[in-house]
């Protein structure tokens, strides 16, 4: 896999996305060529229309992204793929219609867009069909084998099987445990570590994933060193799991792995930059959304008794408490009888206006004030209540480490995992939070914010 902006990306996925972008550009160019080349010539046509072609290509790719057509685990069948493609093209048509209404001079030419739709649909379907063959036949994949046993090895196998677009082809599973098993998830199993290198060379293995739950007494140092000097890439299981999932396997990693692994870089310059960006954009957005916030305040007042804002103490950076502000979306004294509890789906405490503003995430707009004050950042772990923090610190390993950065309005865990309402959910979210803290960068913040816009527009994950 290729590391880009501290993120590991499948080379096949990069080739696919770039290739599809080129095909979209070619589809529009071909449609334009069919209609215009006789009147103005090919080269003159390219000079005239390439910015307009680029506009159509970018909007089409954004529509594909917003319809999850670059999340390959979601497009598991032909019907689902066709439905999402039609939706994406429909969204593209609507957006372009609005743009052309506002700027008629951006229209390429009469009927070109309709001819382009036919060519584009043919290209997209053909390209994705070809890519599905590449995935099924495991082409352009890096051959690998797993050495180890236990939950970590099985967890890696489950993730590789679930994520169709990974650029890894697991060919062998090598363990020291004697059991009557011939295959694990269709992968041949070999016992004993004496012939690891010979097996690797015979299968043309590029990477060996070392995944032991317990290394003492059974770790094959000599054999793995021999594989290393023969040119095979050795990857420890925890790092491989982080690479393919975008989260840390909190239950299996030990403190030494965290201490010696790359990441957790928080330079003074990066902190100052993040603070300046947060301050600037919080001011701009507070001014921009002030009319909307005024209307929401009126609606809350008319809908139910009580204050417009909901203010509550949360735990911030270095476990310093601060007051978080949101629009009130629940009834007054919602926890008077129950005490502190997580929100649930179709929570009866939510008001009529509250259901709307929570679905659209408008209830979180006042947190821009927290960003302005410096208690929060735009991107970071979700700010949690002390009542839950005290419980989770006692039960979940490394939970204290999530407070090494400021909490965020949105975050890596929020975009990668649905709303959490239990200790099990808190553990899963911590895996993503620690991954973010370990790999945080300005580009990663941009990715999180961009994906958050998609989630808000599609009204996903709210309660």
Image (cartoon, rainbow, N blue to C red):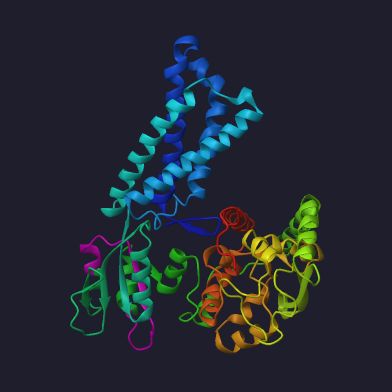
Q: Is residue 104 left or right of residue 132?
A: right
Instruction: State yes or no: residue 3 in magenta.
Output: no
Residue 159 placed where, x, y %? 38, 68
Question: Which image quadrant: the N terminus?
Answer: bottom left
Question: Which image quadrant: the C terminus?
Answer: bottom right
Residue 157 placed where, x, y %? 33, 70
Q: Is residue 88 left or right of residue 286?
A: left
Can residue 257 be seen in this snapshot? Answer: yes
Residue 85 placed where, x, y %? 42, 44
Residue at coordinates 46% horizontally, 65% vertically from top-left? 243
Decide: is 418 above or below 87: below
Can residue 233 be seen in this snapshot? Answer: no
Give 156 or 298, whichever is nearer the viewer. 298
Give 358 or 49, whichever is nearer the viewer. 358
**Bounds of the magenta segment:** 198-220
Instruction: State yes or no: residue 206 in magenta.
Output: yes
Locate residue 206: give its quadrant.
bottom left
Decide: is 332 above or below 308: below
Decide: is 309 above or below 28: below
Residue at coordinates 68% horizontally, 87% vertically from top-left? 337
Residue at coordinates 58% horizontally, 75% vertically from top-left? 344
Q: Is residue 96 left or right of residue 350?
A: left
Residue 285 placed where, x, y %? 76, 53
Picture mark count: 0
Give 290 or 337, whichever is nearer the viewer. 337
Give 12 or 375, whichever is nearer the viewer. 375
Q: Residue furthest top?
A: 39
Locate residue 49: give its quadrant.
top right
């Amino acid at each position: 896999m290729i590391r880009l902006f501290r993120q590991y990306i499948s080379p096949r996925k990069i080739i696919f996305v770039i290739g599809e972008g080129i095909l979209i550009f070619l589809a529009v160019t071909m449609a334009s060529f069919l209609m215009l080349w006789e009147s103005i010539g090919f080269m003159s046509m390219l000079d005239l229309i390439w910015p307009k072609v680029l506009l159509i290509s970018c909007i089409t790719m954004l529509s594909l992204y917003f319809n999850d057509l670059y999340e390959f685990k979601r497009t598991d069948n032909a019907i689902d793929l066709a439905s999402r493609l039609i939706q994406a093209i429909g969204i593209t048509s609507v957006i372009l219609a609005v743009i052309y209404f506002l700027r008629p001079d951006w229209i390429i030419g009469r009927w070109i867009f309709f001819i382009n739709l036919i060519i584009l649909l043919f290209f997209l379907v053909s390209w994705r069909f070809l890519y599905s063959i590449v995935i099924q036949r495991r082409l352009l994949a890096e051959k690998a084998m797993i050495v180890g046993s236990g939950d970590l090895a099985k967890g890696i196998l489950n993730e590789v099987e679930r994520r169709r677009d990974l650029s890894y082809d697991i060919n062998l599973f090598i363990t020291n445990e004697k059991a009557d098993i011939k295959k694990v998830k269709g992968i041949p199993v070999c016992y004993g570590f004496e012939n690891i290198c010979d097996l690797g060379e015979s299968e043309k293995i590029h990477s060996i994933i070392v995944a032991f739950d317990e290394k003492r007494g059974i770790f094959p140092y000599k054999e793995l060193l021999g594989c290393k000097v023969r040119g095979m890439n050795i990857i420890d299981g925890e790092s491989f799991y982080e690479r393919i999932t975008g989260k840390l396997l909190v239950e299996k990693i030990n403190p030494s792995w965290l201490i010696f692994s790359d990441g957790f870089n928080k330079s003074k310059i990066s902190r100052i930059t993040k603070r300046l960006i947060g301050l600037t954009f919080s001011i701009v957005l507070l001014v921009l959304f002030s009319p909307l916030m005024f209307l929401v305040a009126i609606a809350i007042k008319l809908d139910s008794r009580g204050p417009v804002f909901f203010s509550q103490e949360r735990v911030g950076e270095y476990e310093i408490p601060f007051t978080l502000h949101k629009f009130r979306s629940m009834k007054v004294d919602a926890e008077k009888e129950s005490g502190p509890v997580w929100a649930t789906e179709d929570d009866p405490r939510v008001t009529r206006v509250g259901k709307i503003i929570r679905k659209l995430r408008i209830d979180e707009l006042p947190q821009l004030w927290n960003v302005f004050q410096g208690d929060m950042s735009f991107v970071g772990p979700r700010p949690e209540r002390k009542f839950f923090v005290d419980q989770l610190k006692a039960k979940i390993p490394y939970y204290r480490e999530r407070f090494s950065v400021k909490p965020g309005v949105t975050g890596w865990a929020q975009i990668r995992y649905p709303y959490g309402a239990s200790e099990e959910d808190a553990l899963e979210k911590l895996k993503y939070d620690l991954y973010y803290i370990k790999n945080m960068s300005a580009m990663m913040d941009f990715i999180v914010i961009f994906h958050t816009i998609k989630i808000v527009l599609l009204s996903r994950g709210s309660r």
